[in-house]
Amino acid sequence: MRFRLIHFWEARNVVTKVLIGLEMLLIDQKETVIQGFIPSGRIDTYLPYMRAGGIYRLKSFFGSNNKILYRVAEPSFTITFSSTSVLSDLEDSSVCFPEDRFRFHGYEEFDAACDLRGDLYGKFSLFYRIMLI
């Protein structure tokens, strides 16, 4: 799998503050924004070689269903680094990975849409993109 690393952040247990892992937003060659995860025990293996905006190839990973409560990307699955994962930096990639297919939402926006039971953000992004054309 080839991807651009959009952004990453620590995931911690809300109560104990124990580090669970590293959550990531990735974008693949088909312009799909995907949620990624590195378990806490593997962060030191991969993080020193990663930077936001970098393009990488990941071999040997596994996918799992997202928890509805903690989903940060449209697809319902997460790409998780495993003990056999191999990450390669693609500094001179001939494949174009767009950088503008995502938008971060502030707390106020999420709070305002909290109980609307709809995909307000996806529709808003599409509407906004059409308005720019």
Image (cartoon, rainbow, N blue to C red):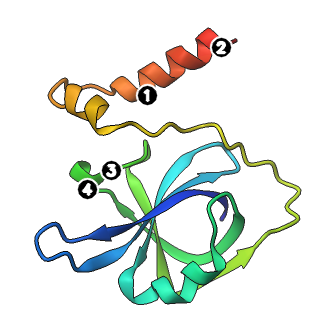
The 10 Å Cα crowd at callout 3, few under 14, some 14 to 19, many 20 or more, is some
Query: Of label 2 and label 1, which has the lower sequence position?
Result: 1
Viewport quadrant of the N terminus: bottom right
Q: To which quarter of the image does residue 30 belong?
A: top right
Q: Position of residue 58 (x, y in %)?
A: 64, 73
Contact (Cβ within 8 Å) of mark 2 with mark 4: no
Residue holding disc 3 = 71
- Give the amino acid at mark 4: Lys
Residue holding disc 4 = 67
- Give the amino acid at mark 1: Gly
Contact (Cβ within 8 Å) of mark 3 with mark 4: yes
Residue shown at the point (32%, 56%) measured from the top left = 66
Inter-mark Cα distance, 2 to 1: 16 Å
Q: Residue furthest left?
A: 15
Q: Mark 2, mark 3: which one is toward the viewer?
A: 2
Q: Secondary structure at mark 3?
A: loop
Q: In front: 80, or 13?
A: 13
Indicate whether 97 appears above or below 53. Answer: above
Residue holding disc 1 = 122
Indicate whether 119 appears above or below 3. Answer: above
Left or right: 91 in relation to 71: right
Q: Position of residue 55 (x, y in %)?
A: 72, 63
Query: Of label 3 and label 1, which has the lower sequence position?
Result: 3
Residue shown at the point (89%, 56%) measured from the top left = 94
Residue shown at the point (52%, 21%) measured from the top left = 126
